[in-house]
Amino acid sequence: MAFVKVLKNKAYFKRFQVKPRRRREGKTDYRARRKMVRQDKNKFNNKKYRMVVRFTNRKCICQIMYATIRGDMVVAQATSAELAKFGIPAGYKNYAAAYCTGLLVARRVLKKFGLDEAFKGKEEIDGADYHVEDEENDKRPFKCILDVGLQTTAAGHRMWGALKGAVDGGLHIPHTNKKFPGFKASDEKGGESEYDADAHKEKIFGGQVKDYMEMLAEEDPTKYEAHFSKYIAGDLDGEKLEEMYTEAHEKIREDPEHQLAEKKGVTHTRGEPGQITSSDGTEHARNKKITLEQRRAKVAAKIAAAQAKLLEADEAEEDE
């Protein structure tokens, strides 16, 4: 038998350091996080803001936060699920919804710091490059950096929609247009690249959704009714999408404040063991946690009942 060298010996395990929990779970890239969070010491603990963009299976989440030793502190946040009150009935994770969410969180955080009047952002949405720091103003714009987590920064990704929305909303986020839809790199080395702002504008206003809706309505009406039922219920088709998003952008600028949901005022009363009755007429089963002594007594009672049953069965057999 050939000699096999033991690599992971006792010395290896004695020196092994366990990775941080979120690294073990595959949730945080700590190398990227250290770069984003690191602050110069001569800035005397000034907050370094990040715009965090995440996508779930149902919505887009944008948050403005800064890091402390106790953890990240959220200054403002917006989700695409809030777009329902701005007239968008569905499609909360596409490029257009990401743009609206970025615009919403930008206007919300500027209003919180009293900068919404000084920095209006780009009110005419045409997909062209815009940098709020280039404008002349007595105040400095609110600066933050983009945090996309573990997502691959592919060209045309939805995260760039959220970035563009926040930039057009008046935030200073250092960026280039190389990853935006409509950008075309030069074929020759040293040549000039091209950026088609109209192609980006089409994505911002849901042009790809419009094309798919029209194609599906023509080729498979049954599937179209199933996939776009919420749009149909809202009397929306492909031609009305641009108007819908334009109105949503205007409403977001008018009132970006988050409105808390009204409390229903439902009270709950505990009746019989494990039964809860609510004031709205519903009933729920909630088992109450018992102590160790009560559990032991419960087990002893079950054992005693089982033994009594066996004794009764034996007595019945003897009588026969």
Image (tube, rainbow, N blue to C red):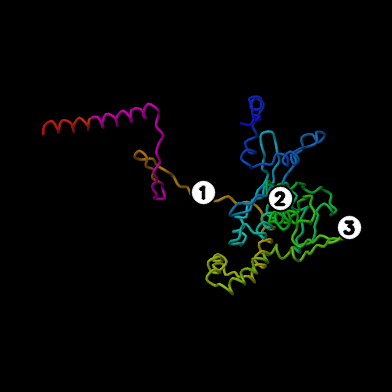
Residue 309: give x, y in percent of width and height.
22, 33
Q: From mark 2 to mark 1, how far is it between C-alphas?
A: 26 Å
Q: Earlier in the sequence, mark 3 or mark 2?
A: 2
Please identify the quadrant where the C terminus is shown.
Answer: top left
Could you say which is closer to the camera, residue 313 or residue 228?
313
Could you say which is closer to the camera, residue 225 or residue 47?
225
Q: Is residue 196 left or right of residue 257?
A: right
Residue 242: give x, y in percent of width and height.
67, 67
| Contact? badges 2 and 1 (CB < 8 Å) | no
Q: Which residues are magenta?
A: 278-307
Residue 266: give x, y in percent of width and height.
45, 47
> Is 304 within the magenta?
yes
Q: Earlier in the sequence, mark 2 or mark 1?
A: 2
Could you say which is closer to the camera, residue 255 or residue 288?
288
**Amino acid bearing label 3:** Gly
**Amino acid bearing label 2:** Lys
Residue 186: give x, y in percent of width and height.
84, 61
> Is 40 within the magenta?
no
Residue found at the far right of this picture: 190
Mark 3 surroundings within 10 Å by alpha-carbon count, few (fewer than 14), some (14 through 19), many (20 or more): few
Q: Earlier in the sequence, mark 3 or mark 1?
A: 3
Q: Secondary structure at mark 3?
A: loop
Q: Is residue 27 left or right of residue 160?
A: left
**Amino acid bearing label 1:** Lys
Residue 111: mark: 2
Residue 190: mark: 3
Residue carrying label 1: 263
Mark 1 surroundings within 10 Å by alpha-carbon count, few (fewer than 14), some (14 through 19), many (20 or more): few
